[in-house]
Image (tube, rainbow, N blue to C red):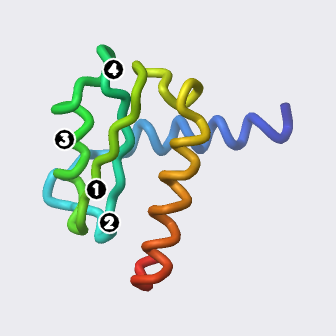
Amino acid sequence: MGIFLPVLRADFCLSESYRFDAQERLLTDLVLFGGRRDSLVPEPDLLAWKELFEGACEYRQFDGDHFFIHSQRDELLAGIADYLSMSLERGTV
């Protein structure tokens, strides 16, 4: 408890004091991964994340639903590795 209580208190404090500012955008690129048959987070909702970033946005779809991360694990990991590799080559990581 001595380890977790300070962490939880800090999380709650941050949660209570945070105020969203739509004008503040993250100055970084973004890659979005989604499942083609995801009924919980449809494509327009997923793509809305790019409104919070100033950099380029790449969107990659995978076969599967909301839990495509399990059924398409190898493909997803390869996609993440590809993105990181390209980012390293461009010097954006």
Which one is earlier in the sequence, the residue at label 4 or at label 2?
Answer: 2
Residue contact between numbered discs 1 and 4, judged by CB atoms under 8 Å: no
Front-lying residue, 78 or 55:
78
Q: Position of residue 37 (x, y in %)?
A: 32, 19
Q: Secondary structure at mark 4?
A: loop
Mark 2, mark 1: which one is toward the viewer?
1
| Dot placed on the residue nearer the N-terminal end, 1 or 4 | 4
Residue furthest toward the right?
Answer: 2
Three-letter code for the amino acid on which mark 2 is drawn? Asp
Q: Which quadrant of the view contains residue 58?
A: bottom left
Name the mark on residue 58: 1
Tell me the kind of residue under disc 3.
Answer: Ala
- The disc, 2 or 1, on the residue closer to the chain's N-terminal end is 2
Q: Nearer the viewer, residue 46 or 52?
A: 46
Q: CA–CA distance between discs 1 and 3?
A: 12 Å
Amino acid, disc 1: Glu
**Mark 1, secondary structure of its residue:** strand
Percent position (x, y) of residue 38? Answer: 33, 20
Neighbor class of circle 2 (other Cα within 10 Å; few <14, some 14-19, many 20+) is some
Q: CA distance from mark 1 to mark 4?
A: 18 Å
Question: Disc 4 marks which residue?
Answer: 38
Q: Residue 35 at x, y = what percent? A: 37, 28
Are the residues at dot 2 and dot 1 in contact (C-beta closer than 8 Å)? yes
In front of the other: 9 or 74: 74
* Label 3 – label 2 distance at C-alpha: 14 Å
Q: CA distance from mark 2 to mark 1?
A: 8 Å
Which residue bears the numbered disc 3?
48
Residue at which label 2 appears: 29
Disc nearest the viewer among 1 and 3? 1
Name the N-terminal-most of marks 3 and 4.
4
